[in-house]
Amino acid sequence: DAKTTQPPSMDCAEGRAANLPCNHSTISGNEYVYWYRQIHSQGPQYIIHGLKNNETNEMASLIITEDRKSSTLILPHATLRDTAVYYCIVTGGSQGNLIFGKGTKLSVKP
Amino acid sequence: DADVTQTPRNRITKTGKRIMLECSQTKGHDRMYWYRQDPGLGLRLIYYSFDVKDINKGEISDGYSVSRQAQAKFSLSLESAIPNQTALYFCATSDLKFAGTDTQYFGPGTRLTVL
């Protein structure tokens, strides 16, 4: 079973920030939080990952709470092309196993 | 990601046929993976390989076999296809830069239909 809990769906207006929450209350000290997204039936696309600190890249920002039990992925200015299923995954990484849950289906609307 | 290619992209076959799905990568990564995705569900790991001489079973390896022919190539075989193997199949690669992080990059997928 996935180690994370995400809302099944969210809507966001185009141009606004999309904030996608994820709960991972059983995360271990050596586990990272990863975010991927899947647009329609394409291959999943890596977005961002983090351990403790907040992270930002050209695609998104990742905010991890101090107790690491939850995180939020932020798409600062959502576009229609950001409509996708977003997966939050907790993994130690070295064992090579990403456990995908059902993710959050984000719909960006004009 | 064009660095990870899968062939064929679509395949329709009949029950009992042998099928091979191929994955190639130009990223120079050591690790490669095969996942399947059923409608409305997340991806599930079939097999993975950390280098050419290393093959490991994933969550749902029954009915599948793999071959790691080279660092850049990882093939998935269905020896005798059955209808419940109808799914989307994804190949992925990764490069463990340091312990704990292992970002995976996925191919475009193969849609397999077994009649």
Image (cartoon, coloured by chain):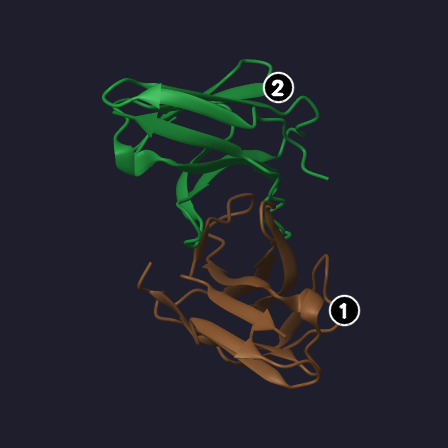
Chain colours: A green, B brown
Q: What mark, if any, has residue B62 been given in the picture?
A: 1
Residue at x 44% of width, y 49% of height: A44
> Under tag 2, what secondary structure?
loop
Q: Which residue is mark 2?
A: A69
Q: How many marks?
A: 2
Can you say which quadrant of the picture contains the C terminus of chain A? top left
Q: Where in the figure is residue B89, as x and y percent of width and height?
A: 54, 64
Q: Is residue A88 above or below residue A109?
A: below
Chain letter of the residue carrying label 1: B
Of residues B14 and B111, the one nearer the viewer is B14
Instruction: State left or right for residue A77 relative to residue A55.
Output: left
* Chain of the residue displaying label 2: A
Q: Is residue A53 visible in the rendered structure shown here?
A: no
| B86 to B59, vertically: above or below | below
Q: Separation of disc 1 and disc 2 at Cα?
A: 35 Å
Report the residue that reaches farthest toward the top: A66
